[in-house]
Image (cartoon, grey):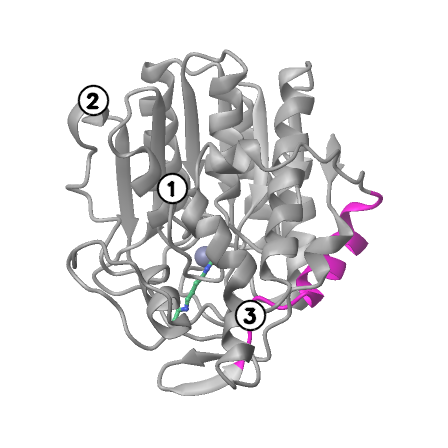
Amino acid sequence: MRLFFDDAQRTHAPARELHNGAFTAYAETPARIDAILRAIGPVEAPEDRGEAPILAVHTQAYAAFLKDAARLWRDAGREGDAIPYAFPVRGRRPLDLTRIDALIGAHSFDATTPITAEAWAASYGSAQSALAATHAVLDGERAAFALCRPPGHHAGADYCGGYCHLNTAAIAAQAARDAGIARVAILDIDYHHGNGTQDIFAGRGDVFYASVHADPKTDYPFYWGHADETGEGEGLGTTLNLPLPHGTRIEAFRAAQSTALDAIAAFDPGLLVVSFGADTWEGDPISHFALTTPNYAVLAADIAARGWPSVIVMEGGYAVDALGHNVASFLSGF
Ligand code: Q9C
Ligand code: ZN
């Protein structure tokens, strides 16, 4: 399988995050990269396909914000990473915002995603890796893997959150659409619901979004991922949410994934994007499922058996010592 990663993806390294009321070490650390690389072996650097495929998903204003935020933060006299603390909840009207504190709150849905000076460059590299994997599959590979870090599925068209800035799965899916694939499906098996991906495609009938995740009644991101969210307008029926309880093991997870795969099969996609998170692992420090390392090969084999050309993008997974083994197990199932 072809594997893609860009060294620029290493540079984003926030010092800390707000976690359960206190600042703790940033869980989405660049050490995750080396853990994965050690386990999966040599990777290819992606070709640079420019900003157009990113701007096919994200707004121009949001991209400009990501590029400017760290400088605006410094200009305001601040040290360290930019972190939001005020948010325009429940649809405040569009405003011409210039103050960094106003801009960052308007482009964030949580306070756990610091914007470093390197956030844009690292996320841009992550998006290019996803695009390289997508084009490899469009060119005939059965499956390809993008080591996307920073991850992507919590980022919406104009907002960041959940350690994510650019939605790599959405960028991959849109690139496949723009290359002429009529129907694209996204299977999200990260522990957390991919609220950004859902938001981006909720109103569209050409991209199916299915997610197996921790119940938002108990888990982040709380405001998305409930079973009654099924899409809107032309996208009604092309969103499927399968929330599961704490303690979920392989039997229940595999059954839910099969339900998602059956729904995707009925949609008959020309290409599948898999948002793969290893934070469903039993020892993950911020999650509460109980999958084992060998379980990932089983889940991957179930996906591969459906026969869709597949682009796999990395999402979460925070037990760094086990992360490489979990990713390698998943890729071995393809
Ligand atoms: N106290 C991904 O896996 N923090 N993002 C939760 C719990 C945010 C995870 C706070 C978790 C985001 C890509
Ligand atoms: Zn996650």
Residue type at tag 1: Thr
How far apart, in angstroms, are the residues tagged by discs 3 and 2?
38 Å
On screen, residue 192 above or below 199: below
Q: Give how far apart the Cα atoms at labels 3 and 1 are.
A: 25 Å
Q: Choose between 89 and 149: the one closer to the eye.
A: 89
The image quarter containing residue 278 is: bottom right
- Residue 88 is left or right of residue 83, and the answer is left
Is 14 left, or right, of 153 in this rendering?
right
Q: Is residue 61 above or below residue 311?
A: below
Q: Is residue 8 left or right of residue 22?
A: right
The N terminus, quarter of image? top right
Identify the residue position indicated by label 2 in the image: 234
Picture coordinates of residue 275 (x, y %)?
49, 41
User: Is residue 84 at all visible to an observer of this figure?
Assistant: yes
Q: Nearer the viewer, residue 289 or 271?
A: 271
Q: What residue did someone put label 1 on?
A: 197
Up/down of 86 relative to 320, above or below: below
User: Which sits in the foreground, 204 or 277?
Assistant: 204
* Badge 1: residue crowd in 10 Å (few <14, some 14–19, many ≥20): many
The picture places residue 304, in percent across and down from the top left corner, at: 56, 25
Tell me if residue 31 is in the magenta stretch: yes
Residue 249 belongs to the span the image colors magenta: no
Query: Which mark is in front, 3 or 2?
Result: 3
- Quadrant (top left/top right/bottom left/bottom right) for the C terminus: top right
Residue 164 at x, y = what percent?
48, 56
Q: Residue at x 20, y 48 (%)?
A: 226
Q: How many marks?
A: 3
Q: Which residue is mark 3?
A: 70
